[in-house]
Image (cartoon, rainbow, N blue to C red):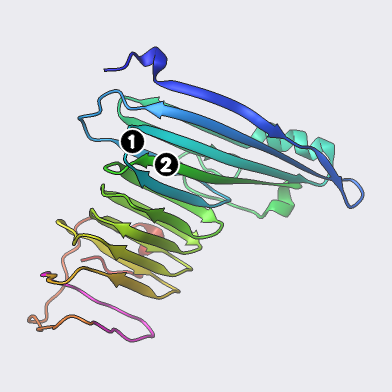
Amino acid sequence: MIPRSLAMLSAVCVLSLPMSMLGNEVEEKQTVQKTFVFDDARAAREVEVDNFEGSIQVTGYDGHEVRLVINETIEADSQEKAQAARREVRLDITQSNNTVRCFVDGPFRCRNGSIHFRGWEHYGYKVRHDFQLKVPQQTGLHLKTVNGEDVEIEKTSGKFEVENINGGIRMTDVSGAGRLYALNGKVRARFTANPDADCYFGSLNGNVEIAFRPQLSANVLLKTFKGQVYSDFPVSYLPSGKPTKKKPLKALDRSIVEP
């Protein structure tokens, strides 16, 4: 086991670029780089990213470290608003046992962690965080973002819980099992091995496209509001019945029935 004093190496603010734009408008950029080593390489490992504005990209690799790069961009109406952005929007990065957690906090968060957003114009600034991570392949992922591009994941094989509100989710060459939900975006996943546990894939305003391996054997519950369902697998129909909810639905998911 690696001593905890060696568990994290970091280089912060390797790029910081203030730039005046269009009169008194301000743009500042910085890049944060960190490397983490899990305390117990044999135990379950997890990476959590709870973002607000920005993208998340995760790539699995044959290694033992979590390599994290975060590009932060601040746009503000003035230098005073830029200072307020740096003071009010905080990026917290922590490691506890075998979990690495990244959390973007700010005035758009309620005390319970939920979102109450009035629009960036209300604050006079906008702060964006774009995450790029390389993780050991067998790492569990818990990823969230609200405004940004697609959440992209490739070459991982752990459990996953991924949510994007105003963007899509794309998983490529993955295995494992879990939940994907995009409120306003497409959900796409391509598996290299069929899931060995229950999965949920959903979107309210986007297509859901899932590519499994041949010889898939599963009970599948499908539901659409205004659309159609297609399958390349042979299908036999089960007797109709009321689906059983395995956990309470969040307020955001109240229109979706989970299997």
| Number of the front mark, 1 or 2 | 1
- Would you identify the image quadrant in which residue 67 lies? top left
**Is the Cβ of the residue at disc 1 closer than 8 Å to that at disc 2?**
yes
**For the residues marked 1 and 2, what is the alpha-carbon distance in whole angstroms?**
9 Å
10 Å crowding of disc 1: few (<14), some (14-19), many (20+) = few
Residue 36's tag is none
Closer to the chain start, of discs 1 and 2, is 1
Q: Secondary structure at mark 1?
A: loop
Look at label 2 and name its amino acid.
Lys
Residue 63's tag is 1
Name the image quarter holding the N terminus: top left
Q: Is residue 221 magenta?
A: yes
Q: Is residue 112 magenta?
A: no
Residue 192 in picture, x, y percent from top left: 25, 60
Residue 134's tag is 2
Q: Which residue is the extreme one toward the front?
A: 62
10 Å crowding of disc 2: few (<14), some (14-19), many (20+) = many
Look at label 1 and name its amino acid.
Gly
Using residue 259 as the reference point, say whether residue 86 is left or right of it. Answer: right
Q: Which residues are magenta?
A: 217-231
The residue that appears at 34% across and 67% down in the rendered structure is 202
Name the image quarter holding the C terminus: bottom left
Q: Secondary structure at mark 2?
A: strand
